[in-house]
């Protein structure tokens, strides 16, 4: 990277800390730190949820699949949009109207302390592994640009995310997510335009493999896509980082709107995000697929904007990491420390405790990211984790949101049985080096290896849902946990409203967007004036962002009247 690239990256990181500091001024209690006081605009929660699904893994894992297999990567990412729309229709509003402060509070009411402990610790391990892949992927991209030790790259960026999340809480997460969305959109659009300009499409079609334009390829078939939609319906509908956004808005209606925004964006944008590696395959073959995205950007971006591209990738990862740190720090603070160790803790004590847990979890996350290469690498780890663990963990919780029959025994049975079978197939048979060709198990091992994704969907998606249907038919009467949820909701109904969108307008989120647009647009204009390469494109983007900022200022004035 050049000097302007380093300046760009430095300014971006400085901007994150400015937003975090401003958010910290609004964070005077643990409620503000972990649920934004239930005052988040629906669009901020929707964009934040959208960005939470992003990470550097999007560029490393899905960018790598796009470079290797083509449009199948677009089809996989479109599944997120379908899942988010379904979650918005069936689940988002129901979470908001429960009257709980955190998703962990619902789990404790519905499944008791045993269910809370089981779900929290298993999901914490799962998310640390999953998010560590994103942090590792970001470091891989940094090392591709800067001669730097991989371990130190992980520590550096992990520390940055932990500090701003610890300082500003959920407001910092939401507002930096919006900033990250702006940066990511601007830069990816710029890369796509520069790569498309002057490209000979006839030569491109001849250069890429024959299967490149198919929505399915290799082990990623239609059954896998069905499973991927199902997996992410349960993830978006029950994972605490997403549920937190349903709880942070003012009403069930706004919770639905936030999920619909998330879903629509994932239906229409995957092709846009993945254009760089898709186009790069027609230009250069034989590169490391995990670095294809950043190499594609590097091939066309003028000095200064490549730093913005890396800032965008950092943005995506920071969004995912900060969301998970915030939600689990909230659970450990409210539902463990306060509930079991210090029920009389003051707001000041809880705030300090929340920041301590953020720091502790951040350290565990950095350590796990350093260990990713020893756990099978980015693509293998992230897809296997989601395929085998998401539905067994989240399906019982989501089922308990609607069903009054299943209880803690059913929850644990579904999870542990699915875990055991999945681990046995994944590591006991398909990855067991002790099984020889002469063994009768060799045929089974070969089948599992050849159809690994379908097997993961069967074991990790279909099997736990069938178990839940079986328990639903077998159980009679109302589970005590369901009665506790109904009782709690009845107590909270006096303070809840069906639609609280008429609350006083809070200009803080919109102003953060306004300032972000002005700063990013201004810096792009500076780069355009400084660099002759792509000057017209840079100036067009810069002035366009300034005009958009002006429109937001007019909207703020109108709403404040």
Image: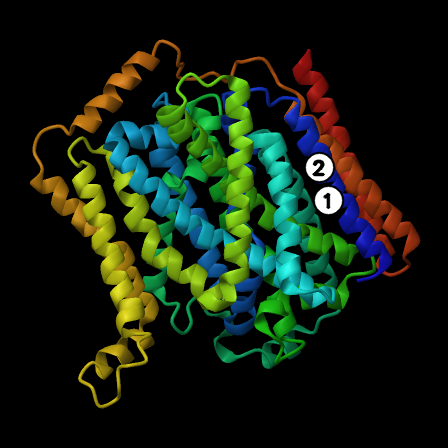
Q: Which mark is residue 426?
A: none
Q: Name the residue carrying label 1.
A: 13
Residues at marks 2 and 1, CA–CA distance in whole angstroms: 7 Å
The residue shown at (59%, 35%) is 166
Quadrant that contains the N terminus: bottom right
Residue 411 image-quadrant placement: top left
Indicate the position of residue 107 as horizontal and vertical percent values: 31, 33
Is residue 156 found left or right of 391 in the rendered image?
right
The residue shown at (43%, 34%) is 332
The residue shown at (38%, 71%) is 219
Q: Give the answer, above or below, for where 224 lies relative to 487.
A: below
Q: Name the residue carrying label 2.
A: 17
- SS state under label 2: helix
Asked if residue 39 shows in the view, the reply is no
- SS state under label 1: helix
Is residue 202 found left or right of 123 in the rendered image?
right
The residue shown at (63%, 75%) is 282
Indicate the position of residue 222 as horizontal and vertical percent values: 35, 64
Label 2–label 1 contact, CB within 8 A? yes
Q: Give the answer, above or below, for where 306 lies relative to 347.
A: below
């Amino acid at each position: 990277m050049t000097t302007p690239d380093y300046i760009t990256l430095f300014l971006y990181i400085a901007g994150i800390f400015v937003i975090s500091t401003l958010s910290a001024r609004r964070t005077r209690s643990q409620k503000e730190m972990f649920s934004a006081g239930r005052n988040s605009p629906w669009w901020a929660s929707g964009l934040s949820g959208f960005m939470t699904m992003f990470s550097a893994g999007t560029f490393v894992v899905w960018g790598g699949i796009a470079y290797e297999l083509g449009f199948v990567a677009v089809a996989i990412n479109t599944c997120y949009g379908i899942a988010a729309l379904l979650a918005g229709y069936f689940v988002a509003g129901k979470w908001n109207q429960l009257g709980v402060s955190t998703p962990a509070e619902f789990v404790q009411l519905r499944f008791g302390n045993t269910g809370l402990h089981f779900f929290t610790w298993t999901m914490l391990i799962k998310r640390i592994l999953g998010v560590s892949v994103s942090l590792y992927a970001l470091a891989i991209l940094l090392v591709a640009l800067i001669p730097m030790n991989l371990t130190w790259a992980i520590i550096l960026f992990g520390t940055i995310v932990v500090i701003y999340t610890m300082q500003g809480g959920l407001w910092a997460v939401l507002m930096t997510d919006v900033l990250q969305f702006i940066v990511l959109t601007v830069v990816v659009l710029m890369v796509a335009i520069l790569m498309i300009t002057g490209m000979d499409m006839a030569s491109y079609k001849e250069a890429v493999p024959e299967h490149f334009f198919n929505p399915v390829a290799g082990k990623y078939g239609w059954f896998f896509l069905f499973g991927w939609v199902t997996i992410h319906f349960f993830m978006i509908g029950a994972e605490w980082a997403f549920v937190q956004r349903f709880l942070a808005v003012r009403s069930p209606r706004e919770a639905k709107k936030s999920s619909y925004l998330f879903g629509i964006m994932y239906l229409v944008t995957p092709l846009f995000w993945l254009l760089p590696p898709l186009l790069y395959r027609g230009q250069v073959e034989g590169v490391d697929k995990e670095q294809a995205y950043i190499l594609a950007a590097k091939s066309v971006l003028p000095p200064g904007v490549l730093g913005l591209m890396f800032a965008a990738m950092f943005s995506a990862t920071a969004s995912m990491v900060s969301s998970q740190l915030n939600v689990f720090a909230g659970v450990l603070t409210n539902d463990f420390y306060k509930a079991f160790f210090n029920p009389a803790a003051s707001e000041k004590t809880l705030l300090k405790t929340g920041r301590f847990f953020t720091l502790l979890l951040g350290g565990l996350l950095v350590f796990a990211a350093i260990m990713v290469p020893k756990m099978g690498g980015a693509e293998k780890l992230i897809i296997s984790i989601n395929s085998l663990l998401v539905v067994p963990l989240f399906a019982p919780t989501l089922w308990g949101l609607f069903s009054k029959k299943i209880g803690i025994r059913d929850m644990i049975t579904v999870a542990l049985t699915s875990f055991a079978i999945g681990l046995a197939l994944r590591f006991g048979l398909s990855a067991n080096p002790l099984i020889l060709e002469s063994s009768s198990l060799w045929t089974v091992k070969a089948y599992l290896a050849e159809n690994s994704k379908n097997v993961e969907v069967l074991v990790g998606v279909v099997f736990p849902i069938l178990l839940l249907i079986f328990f639903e038919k077998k159980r009679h009467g109302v589970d005590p946990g369901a009665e506790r949820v109904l009782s709690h909701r009845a107590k909270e109904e006096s303070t809840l409203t069906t639609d609280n969108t008429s609350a006083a307008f809070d200009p803080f989120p919109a102003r953060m967007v306004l300032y972000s647009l002005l700063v990013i647009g201004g810096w792009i204009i500076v780069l355009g004036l400084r660099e002759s390469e792509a000057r017209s494109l840079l100036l067009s983007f810069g002035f366009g962002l300034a005009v958009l900022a002006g429109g937001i200022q007019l909207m703020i004035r109108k709403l404040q009247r």
